[in-house]
Image (cartoon, rainbow, N blue to C red):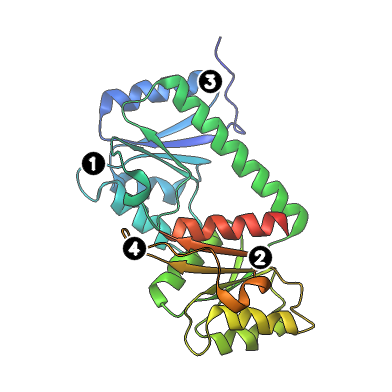
Amino acid sequence: MSVEITDESPLILFVDDESHLRVTVRDFLAHHGYRVELARSGEQALRKLQVCTPSLVILDISMPGMGGMGFLQRVQASAEPPPPILILTARINLRTFFDGVDVAGFIAKPCHKELLLEKIEAVLATTSRQARSEDASGSQHVLLGEDDPEMADRLSRALSRKGLRVTTAESGPAVLEVAPSQKPDVVVLKRYLTGLNGGPVASLLRAMPTTSSTPIVVYNTVGVGDRVESATIGAGSRDVNRYVVARDSADILDAIQLTLTSA
């Protein structure tokens, strides 16, 4: 028995260059009560986003033209936060390939329709919970101490898409200057930071009355094959709520969200 579709039903944008798959998925999702828009390419999907606001985008990564990655880069560079995006792909090492790209999840291709439905329901449920939490508590504020402009931009965009306000400081002294006046919900520090490293900055923040109880995350990025050190930052470790050895930006984002949740 099909579910009735109304104007309030979630809208899904399905992007894939296989015409048979587009029709099959459209009919299946419509049967389960979803409104569906179709696009055969990344370029067409971008045009669709100009005239509609989907609750979710399901994106094939391997398409002619700009492809799925080109679409992702365009929407995530936009000033407007994109909708949640599920990646449809046959790639195996997904986490490494999509490092730094903020997506809601992955679906192996080809996939079973029931699994697709479960993924959609899970993402929409998470989005709904996040929206209710933001409405109840207001936007949380992250102070990010990062002296690499590319990493700072990547993390700032990802955090903003999760509904967080972000202030970036390019050095340890800049963090110490900004934190007392802005009173962020969490301070996130690169371990080796221009002017003053993350550990000493954390210790000084703990000594300031206005930031003594502010949660602090310190991270150290390492490359594939690098020796992973012990999860401590020496003298400043007692002042840090969470220390993360990050293989990619997703590890840092996970640490921030865990810290905000437990604060």
- Residue that sits furthest to the right in the current view: 209
- Residue that sits furthest to the left in the current view: 64
| Residue at left offset 68%, top offset 64% | 140
Q: Which mark is residue 241?
A: 2
Q: Which mark is residue 226?
A: 4
Mark toward the start of the polypeptide (2 vs 4) = 4
Q: Distance of mark 3 from mark 1, alpha carbons?
A: 27 Å
The residue closer to the viewer here, 36 or 18, is 18
Marks 4 and 1: CB-CB under 8 Å? no
Badge 2: residue crowd in 10 Å (few <14, some 14–19, many ≥20)? some
Mark toward the start of the polypeptide (3 vs 1) = 3
Mark toward the start of the polypeptide (3 vs 4) = 3
Q: Give the mark toward the camera: 2 or 1.
A: 2
Circle 3 sits on which residue?
Answer: 32
Amino acid type of disc 3?
A: His
Tell me if residue 255 comes above or below residue 11 in the rendering: below
Q: Distance of mark 3 from mark 2, alpha carbons?
A: 44 Å
Mark 1 falls on what kind of element?
loop
Quarter the C terminus occupies: bottom right
| Residue at left offset 61%, top offset 56% | 257
Circle 1 sits on which residue?
Answer: 63
Task: Where is residue 139? Give x, y as percent.
Answer: 68, 62
Quarter the N terminus occupies: top right
Side of 57 where 159 appears, left or right: right
